[in-house]
Every structure is written in structure tokens, then in C-alpha cells.
Amino acid sequence: MKPLFIILAFACQVFAQTPEPKPCPEPPKPEPEKPPVATAAKPELDAKKTLTDVKAIVNNEPKKRSIADITKACQVHDGLFRIHADRESGAIFLYVRKDQLQHEFLYFSHVSDGVVSAGRNRGQFDAQEVFSISKHFERLEFTMQNTSFYFDPEHPLARAANANVGNALVASEPVIASDDQGYLINAANLFLKETFMQVKHASVSETKSVLGKLSESKTKFMAWGSFPRNTFFNVEYIFENPAPPSNPDDDAKQSSELADPRYVGIRVQHTFVAMPVNDFQPRVDDPRIGYFMTQLTDQTSTEV
């Protein structure tokens, strides 16, 4: 019986040393599917589109409108400068040809109607200037030239003709559209503001000025036209002054010429004129002729 006892004892020892089986781990739960990220679908490229159109599509840039698209509802007035007038919206566009850049033109303005108490009466002449148009990137610049001095081109001092002399950059307008021949700009900023001409005279005291602040909403184009040698714009400027000045000496005059001194209108005509090409020779000023508004100083002449 002893061997059987040994076998049973050995078997109990083996089963006692056998480790208990570990439970099987649960399989990993699948992660919830993420919703697909929305991506902007790129439009299909058409083989007929130009390289500029393709770049605009790839970069999602809006396509620039053409002159024909902008002016399709406009009346055209062709001449020195072409005018496109939209009769529905009242928008006025000015077309500048490429061959007109870097050339000089004459600018002239006069009051077609106004009020005496404001210092602006019918028939009053104002600006007589020489200006030029240039292109700076995507803008057209209108510059008034300083014509106060003259230098003989053959004189050594002519090399310093532009020293310490300033021109006036009166307007820098963005190009709305362009084609092979020229550029289209908005004429409102040129003429519906006091860009070329200061309609309201400078006053020492603002309270003494009959004209108040220029109303952008009421100022408007009244007439326009273009001819082979000139282009004009007639504008009515409306000035508002909620508290107009009161002068006992001028009360009677103001009451007769103004329906309401708080609202004063001045009509001005702006004219662009082609620079004349002729054999005109300047003559010596004769005081018997009268008063001249234009003065020119010859910086290279020794005569008095």
C-alpha cells in the first residue's frame, strides 16, 4: 500500500502547483467612426479657360469684371475722354486710354450758378491748371503741374528746374476694369468732392462761413458730355449748415437769395481740355490789356 500512497500524494502536489487559468481578456471595442471632413470641391477646369481663369479657380479668387460687363447698361459719350453714364443708378464712369497717360491736359472750372453771399456767383471763373495722368500699379493718378516757373532748356540752371518745386497729387483712383486700350475708373470721387476745385472758400472763422459741410448724399451730377477736344462734368454741390451765421448787415440779402440758409447749392462745371498743338509764341505782357490771372516767372532771364 505504500507505493499507492506515494502516487496519490504526488498527484495532489502536482494539482496544487498548477495555476488557475486566467480569464480571457475582452476584445477591444471598435472606436466610433469619425464623420468625414467636409472639403470644398474644386470646380472642374475647362480646357477653354485662359491661364488667368485657371489661376483664379485654383486660388478661389473672384474673376475681375470686364468693362463690357460693367458698362453694358450705360450710355456712351465718346470724345476726348469717354464717359459711361448709367441712367438707372446714376453712376458715371470715366475711361482713360493708355495713350493718354503721361500727357498734359488743361483743366478749367467755372461756376454755372450759385449765391453771392457764399462768394460763388454765376459766370465766376476759378481754376486754370495743367494736369497729367499716370498709372501706379492698379491706380490712376491725377497730378496738377506747377507752372509758375520757366527755365530755358539751353541754360545750365535748367538741370535744377524741378528742385524744390512741388506738384499736387489731387486724386489716386483705383482701376475698376481695363482692356487692351485703356482703364475704367469711377468719376464720382473726382468730381462729387472738392478734388479739383475748392468750392467752399477758406474762412478764418467757421462760424462766419455761409457754406456748411458738403453733403455727399445730396451732391450729384447735373450734366456731362464729351467732344473731340474737351470733356465736361456739371455738378451741383450741396452744403449743409444746421446753424448758419447771422449777420444783421447780410440778413436781408441772404433772405432774398436763399430759400433756407441751412442748405446752399453751388453748381460748378469742370472741363478737361486737350493741350493745343500750334506755333503760338508768348508775347510780352502789356498792362493796357488788363488783368491776367496766370503768372509765369522766367528763372533763367536777366531782364527785369
Image (spheres, grey):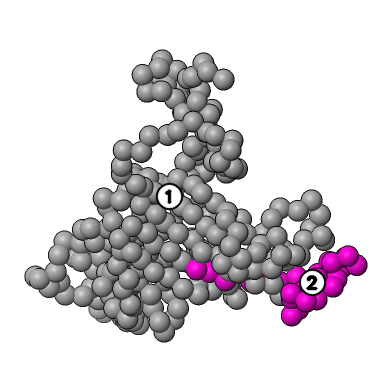
Which quadrant of the structure image shows residue 199? bottom right
**Residue drawn at x 20%, y 62% as measured from the top left:** 52
Which quadrant of the structure image shows residue 292? top right
The x, y position of residue 274, in whole percent, is: 35, 52
Which quadrant of the structure image shows residue 153? top left
Q: Which residue is mark 2?
A: 254
Comes first in the chain, label 1 or label 2:
1
Q: In the rendered view, would you say 213 is above or below 181? A: below
What distance separates the C-alpha of mark 1 from that of mark 2? 35 Å
Q: Which residue is mark 1?
A: 106
Of the numbered discs in the image, which one, if any, rests on residue 299? none
Answer with left or right where residue 203 lies relative to residue 12: right
Disc 2 secondary structure class: helix
Asked if disc 1 and disc 2 are in contact, CB closer than 8 Å, the reply is no
Write the start and end of the magenta stretch as one range: 234-261
**Residue drawn at x 50%, y 23% as measured from the top left:** 299
**Residue drawn at x 33%, y 57% as measured from the top left:** 229
Answer with left or right where residue 234 lies relative to residue 31: right
Query: Mark 2 packing: few (<14 Cα in 10 Å), some, or many (20+)?
Result: some
